[in-house]
Amino acid sequence: MGMNIPGWSPDLERSFKEILFRFLEEVHSTKAAMYLQAEDGSYVLMTQYGFGKRDALASEHHQGSPLVVKAREIRSTPQAFNDLNRSPEIAGYLEGAGTARLLLVPLYTNSGLIGFVDARDKGRKRQFSPRDVDRAGAIANSVMSLIRRAGLHGEQETTDEVSPKSRTPRSAEIHVGNRHLSYLEGMLDSRGLAGVLETVGKVIELPGIYGIALTIIASKAATTVIFATEAMQQFDKNALLRHQTETMGGVGIAPVDSANWRVGIRKLSGGEVAEPHSVIATDVLLFEESWAFVGSILAASGCRSVRTGSERLRRRARLESQLARLRFSRRAIAQRLLVPGERTYPDLEEHSKNVSRLSWKIARELGWDEDDVELAAISGLLHDIGMRELDYDRLYRHRSPGADEQRTYQRHVAVGEKILGDLGLPQITAAVRHHHERWDGEGYPDRLRGNAIPKLARLVHVAEVYDVLTSSQSYRDRVSSARAMEILNAGSGRQFEPGLVEALAKVV
């Protein structure tokens, strides 16, 4: 799909598709397709999800296509179409596509319309809402960010700025050929990369070492980022690339054309003045069939720290890769636990994902370490897992439950605990059981009070109540974010831990 777009690749398509899936998760559209402008001016289908063989999905749109004309008209603001009678300009297209509900999301730059997303058919035949339009705009920003990182249509994020002047480089600054390094999720995720960069900061402090080059090779494209001390003089970039190419060839990695190899420099503070004659030591840190992670140390001639530095980088990269795979597996298992079979509960899924994202934000705001931040996100995702085993369809939207319904509903925490009990996730299991405890001890199931409530449960409780109050899919009338915070502040010190309410206010 879309292979006639310069710079496009199967790996890049998968990366875009991951973003496209957010329309399913956040907007509940059952189908979405992304188009980008080709060299002949037409808009070509690049990737999609949800469309079957019987669905009407154009492989390309010409300049006069109703969608292209409309996308150019609305520029950078997504627009929802829920009624054919109110959308005469694209009514014919919608009828031909067999749908009455469409969310059109332009991909617009200073040079004009470079593409768009056609998202259709919100689940359960609901209409697209203003909130869906806002979410679509946020997703479009993510699409445009990847377009810039990939260098498509001349949209680029440069990698050769000199910043920041610190000894530990920031992972957010590394980009890879046609994708950000975080694309390597499950092999070397952003957290794992941060660990490697921490070691880079330590290795570059060893005597005689004045630079470290990290390279990612994927889909016949490569990006090298050189972390160099301020004192590093000019060096032979071509010699570095030749050295890395020779080393990669030794393990069967095909060479990368220089036209597809980007190089940038990040200056780090301090360092000894580099000698004009230097050595390069290269190691393939990680290697899979479709990608490789390579590191080179730039050092003074005769430097005795090269072997030590190389070994530290290699050990850290392989350790972080193993841990990233474990994290990826744990998140995948959590997603499967939430939706284990063919029967789905869209409202419950959306609520769980909202609480997960909010729990993650609160945990980061509180300065929790990365392990606890991830546990918070997974706890938020699974906190209501017990609901699907009960009479969910009847109970979830019940506005005036009787005593029997309330007792049945309250069982979901014990049922969730039982589901997770033997999976080796004790902290998450405790959060699931206790996320309805109250700070004053008046909650359930065990009437725990204050700090006796597990901290993950206290956090999830705050996040869940906020989402229930503000979500349009909730069982109760939706209120504004400001009103929700008034309610939460009123319960601070009674229902909620005060510090968590304060942290929530900073992230919503």
Image: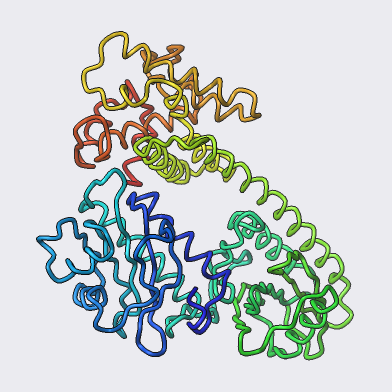
The answer to which image quadrant residue 320 occupies is bottom right
Residue 347's place in the image compared with 53, above or below, is: above
- Residue at 63% across / 54% down in the picture? 186
Residue 59's place in the image compared with 449, above or below, is: below
Q: Can you give x and y, in whole percent of width and height, for residue 175 in the image? A: 56, 72
- Residue at 31% across / 85% down in the picture? 111
The answer to which image quadrant residue 133 occupies is bottom left
Q: Can you give x and y, in whole percent of width and height, for residue 358 in the image? A: 40, 42
Residue 220's place in the image compared with 192, above or below, is: below
The answer to which image quadrant residue 246 occupies is bottom right
- Outermost left residue: 85
Q: In the picture provided, is 130 more to the left or to the right than 174? A: left
Q: Nearer the viewer, residue 160 or 294?
A: 294
- Residue at 42% across / 81% down in the picture? 155
Q: Nearer the viewer, residue 124 or 266?
A: 124
Q: In the picture provided, is 144 more to the left or to the right than 399? A: right
